[in-house]
Amino acid sequence: MATLMSDEVFHDVAYKARNRNHLLSAIDEFLDAVTVLPPGEWDPTIRIEPPAAVPSQDQRKRPPEKQKDEPDEEEDEQKLREESGLSRSGRLFGGLINDIKRKSPWYWSDFKDALALQCIASWIFLYFACLSPIITFGGLLGHATGNNMAAMESLVSGFVCGIGYGFFSGQPLTILGSTGPVLVFETIMYDFCQSKGWDYMSFRFWIGMWIAVILIILVAVDASVLVCYITRFTEENFATLIAFIFIYKAVENVLSIGKKFPVNTHGDTILNYECFCTPTNRSFALENVNWTYLKEDECLLKNGTMLGAGCDTPHYVPDVFLMSIILFLGTFLISVQLKDFKNSLFFPSKVRQVFSDFAVIIAILSMTGLDFYAGIKTPKLQVPSEFKPTLEGRGWFISPFNNNPIWTAILAALPALLGTILIFMDQQITAVIVNRKENKLKKGCGYHLDLFVLGILIIICSVMGLPWFVAATVLSINHVNSLKLESECAAPGEKPQFLGVREQRVTHILIFLMIGLSVVLTPVLGHIPMPVLFGVFLYMGVASLKGLQFFDRLLIIFMPVKYQPDHMFLRQVPLKRVHIFTLIQLACLVILWVIKSFSTTSILFPLMLVVMIGIRKSLDFVFSRRELKILDDIMPETTKRTEEERRQLEGEEGKADIDTTGNLQIPLANGNIMKIPLASINISEEVNKTGIWKQVNEGSCAYKDGKKKKSPNKNSSKSKKRGNKKDAVSDDEKTRLSTMAEEEEEEGLTIKIDSCHTIDFGTANRKANGLNAAETSV
């Protein structure tokens, strides 16, 4: 740095630099012009003759050839939105047509790129990850809709929607699944139809038709361009919430096993199980029935009553709950450890990569084998064994009215509006998360095409009486993570570099093809313990938090500063401002959690996501544009920014300005402004010109002379030195120094040299920062 600052040209550029790119350009220019004598290439004892004449620097000082203007950030953002299909085309279905044109050249490569072992691992892992929630959701849906739709209908819907979406969607990395708000919507509509005496499936048929029509209209008018308002603030809130729900539900389901199969804490104590059935009245007693030996269900069926001290004593099943805990934690820990095995020090890189890709599958197989070996009757996965509708007498095609009034077809448009908001927000936010630039996708997006395909699939599901499937956030994130590509490390200790994602359609198609064939695989799937699948849920929830900046900022709150990771946003934004942004985002997350937790308010969850976008827009009044650009994505403006705003954003790193007197103004953290003259300043030359420095040098010389030739009288020596000092500073010199000090004080740059040789820059700033003189001295 000393060598760089000694160069006149670099010195001038360094003071005028507006951002780091200017400094880097100046260093490149200096390295092009400098001559270097590397050690070992020349004999340092040989004297290098000085040049006859100092080379002129005029050639380097000439302004460079006029280059193209720096790119306008607003234009870059608009260009990026156009490439992603997030700008209005100006014609009906223009966005859909552009998506098809963008994705069609990649269609065959989506099948060829799947020829990799990594895709097989991703397919099997996500098959189990998708199968269990589909069956679980089917059970909840059957309870909420009177078995009109249950596990069998969910499996068929997964097969139909998954295959259709995998072949024709714009972004096949997105995994379809069932969501909580859709379940609440189905429950409300079923209760409404029951109260009116209408046939629920027929009314739902028309709701689905209206939802599909509205979605296709949104595709026609390019409504998906509104996705660009979903910034990282909203999408990370949504992704974090869904990940927390996966983690919470996984733990809750395991604990529910403990309620059904409680742990026997009584040891070897003989428990009282005396409990027998008695008739409720004399007429029942006269019947030829041995009431004492009836079991509880048979007793209640005959309107009997169970009596005895042991009726409340639970029938303990040995070790079921504890074994479930072992399977649950074992699956999670094996998945986590083997997933990171690719960074270990053992085995060749290809072997480590295989273990990493098949981590979850190895965990499922090993824990299932342990359960089979132990022989403990833990809860197993229940899959329907017959291909038929759950409700007796219900066919695979729904009648449009089935004794419902004809005008219900028109009335269905009102609940369809709410259903459209649910599906649109769930689908598009998940698509934004999958298509985020950090994933380095190369085959483009397809927001309009995805929404169009989803509308067609909703028509099919409504006709067949199947649940509606939309993009599932956690499943989609784990699908992307399972297909990530990294560079091979050649050097010891070298960290692999993220290269992108293996973009293809085959894994999506195979996953849901296997979902449809699950009815045939019932004998095999019936051996998989549910705690193992709950462990997979826990792993997916934890893995989907990795890489979320919001979660990283949450962890930073609890870290001392010296242990905080070297994140770029910590370098560029003050820590206090980072914490304020994080706390606002955390408050929004808590509100979303509360709304989603209660069944009465869960239907409003997608509407609250729209409110989140409004809250993010209001942060423009709290944080500067530069801070929001670093901590979040900049929301698109309705009009082009002014030149002044653009210029301020360009100077984001230096954030400097030039005043009318030609000084460079640099705002400091304490609110003061540091002024530096743009003219080249050589501190050594300026100091040597001052009378005080001359006096110091003169006194130093006198001291050296006095040391060589001692004065006979110590007092006379001291008086002589004082006389020299007094004579050294003349009246003219004092006047010049005071004038110079006043000018420097006005310019905001104070150079003060006292008897201790101290140079003090910016006394006002030093006082504002609470620094003492020793801390600001040179």
Image: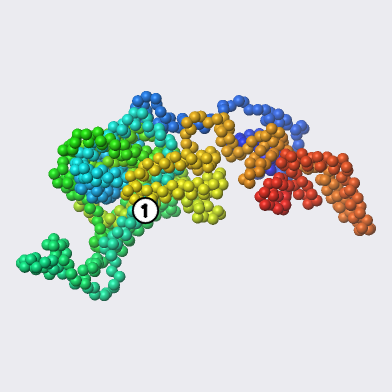
723 sits to left or right of 116 = right
In percent of width and height, residue 413 lies at: 28, 35
Position in image of residue 400 (x %, y %) = 19, 35
**Colouring mode (rainbow / by chain / secondary structure / one colour):** rainbow
Please tell me whether residue 88 is drawn above or below residue 118 in the rendered image: above
Q: Position of residue 583 (x, y in %)?
A: 48, 49
Q: Is residue 283 left or right of residue 13?
A: left
Q: For this rendering, which residue is in front, 276 or 471? A: 276
Structural crowding at the residue carrying mark 1, measured as other residues with C-alpha within 10 Å and reported as few (<14), some (14–19) or many (≥20) = many
Q: What count of labels does the image hold?
A: 1
Q: Which of the two residues, 116 or 745, is positioned nearer the viewer here?
A: 745
Vertical placement of residue 415 versus 301, above or below: above
At 56% from the left edge and 26% from the top edge, which residue is drawn?
A: 68
- Check the picture and name the quadrant holding the N terminus: top right
Place of residue 301 in the rendered image (x, y in percent of width and height, measured from the top left): 13, 60
Q: Which residue is mark 1?
A: 247
Residue at point 46% right, 41% down? Answer: 616
Q: Is residue 288 visible?
A: yes
Label 1 SS:
helix
Query: Does the image show residue 544?
Result: no
Res 224 → quadrant: top left
Please, what is the three-letter code of the amino acid marked with disc 1?
Ile
